[in-house]
Amino acid sequence: MSDEIAHIEREADEDDNDAVQSALDDDLDLEAPEADSAEQHTELLQHRDDPVTARPADRDGEADPADTAEQRRVVAVDEDDYR
């Protein structure tokens, strides 16, 4: 009986090793769903926000600087989390 258990444990270990190797070959985390991994590996279209430039002297005081900075934020078109 113990030989059968040892054999089953060896097979399970081999299956685990195969799964780990497959995940390493695919460059995916074992626990990560495929859709999440694909999303994390997509390239960004624009890598940074537009630079904040100095405002002309005649427009001083028209807008809060934080609002101006927020308007210059780059947000992906299909970004679901942006509100």
Image (cartoon, rainbow, N blue to C red):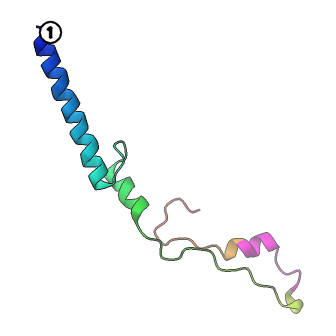
Q: Residue at x 85, y 88 (%)?
A: 59
Q: Secondary structure at mark 1?
A: helix
Q: Is residue 36 above or below residue 71?
A: above
Residue 65: % across, % down: 81, 73
Q: Is residue 29 above or below residue 7?
A: below
Between residues 29 and 65, which one lies in front from this camera angle? 29
User: Dividing the picture into quarters, in which one does residue 6 lie?
Assistant: top left
Is residue 25 found left or right of 60 in the rendered image?
Answer: left
Amino acid tagged 1:
Ser
User: Dividing the picture into quarters, in which one does residue 3 lie?
Assistant: top left
Is residue 12 found left or right of 50 in the rendered image?
Answer: left
Query: What span is in magenta?
Result: 60-69
Q: Residue furthest top?
A: 1
Between residues 9 and 56, which one lies in front from this camera angle? 9
Residue 49: % across, % down: 63, 75
Residue 34: % across, % down: 32, 52
Q: Residue at x 40, y 62 (%)?
A: 41
Q: Residue at x 89, y 80 (%)?
A: 61
Residue 33: % across, % down: 34, 48
User: Quadrant where the N terminus lies?
Assistant: top left
Tag 1: Cα neighbours inside 10 Å, few (<14), some, or many (≥20)? few
**Label 1: which residue?**
2
Q: How many marks?
A: 1
Between residues 45 and 64, which one lies in front from this camera angle? 45
Q: Is residue 56 magenta?
A: no
